Amino acid sequence: LRRFSREDEDLVRGILFDLVESGLVFQKGSKDATVYRLASTDDFERATPGDTKSSLMAVVWLQVYLHGPTTPAQIAERLVVDEKDVAAALAPLVDEGRVSSQDDQYSCDVFVLAHDDPSGWEAALFDHYNAVVTALCIKLRNVRLRSLPDDVLGGSTYSFEVWDGHPFEARVLSLLADTRRELSKLREEVDTYNDKVSRPDDASKVTFYFGQSVIEPDGDAP
């Protein structure tokens, strides 16, 4: 709390609680005597199976999407987990048709987590982070190569200042929800078309990322 003294205390405690619940941080003790440390492999093995199963399955699914075709051993090495746990996570993904397998190689064309899904938030967070970093790296490389037009590759940030009763408050605050609806509809249309035609080998993968934050008047920016 001293380290993040500028932040809201309840927010800091909430984030710490989420880290413990997700298994990323190990907690021992209670109240002021509580101590925390980065969770080890042994801590993961002692975690409640029901809490970690859905999260691991989402993270494994994302790894297949990003790096497929890939093997359980390769996924286990990237995630630093046991290969048998990866195999256990892959099984339901294959059964549900989210991932396909052939000769111990796993692949998929779609990775979708509902924004209100309580499980797998770690995978969603990493997916967004990966999209941002990848876009930045490609943009920097493209500055040298100039192989793509600026309106195809890059990113933009917009900030708005609104308040209760502001004529544009509702439009600004609904940007996240409106963009989600528009992109979900477009993705469905693209997927429907792609399922009906033969995909060429030189097909491009376009990743569009977006996010929204709201800082209250009495809050500090992170």
Image: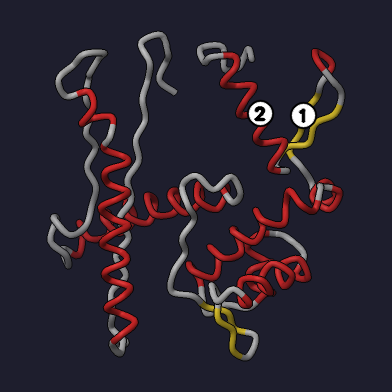
Q: How crowded is mark 2: few (under 14 residues within 10 Å), some or many (20 or more)?
A: some
Which of the marked residues, 1 or 2, is nearer the chain's N terminus?
2
Residue 36 - label: 1
Q: How crowded is mark 1: few (under 14 residues within 10 Å), some or many (20 or more)?
A: few
Of residues 38 and 126, the one drawn nearer to the viewer in this rendering = 126
What residue would you read off at disc 2? Answer: 16
Q: In which quarter of the image is the C terminus?
A: top left
Residue pictured at 26% horizontal, 37% vertical: 175
Indicate the secondary structure of the residue bearing disc 1.
Answer: strand
Query: Where residue 114 appears, x then y in whole percent?
Result: 47, 52
Q: Quadrant of the N terminus?
A: top right
Q: What residue type is labelled 2?
A: Leu
Residue 198 - label: none
Q: For marks 1 and 2, give the one nearer the viewer.
A: 2
Residue pictured at 17% horizontal, 67% vertical: 147
User: Cβ–Cβ below 8 Å for labels 1 and 2?
Assistant: yes
Q: Can you tell which quarter of the image residue 38 is in?
A: top right
Please give left or right for residue 181 compared with residue 110 in the image: left
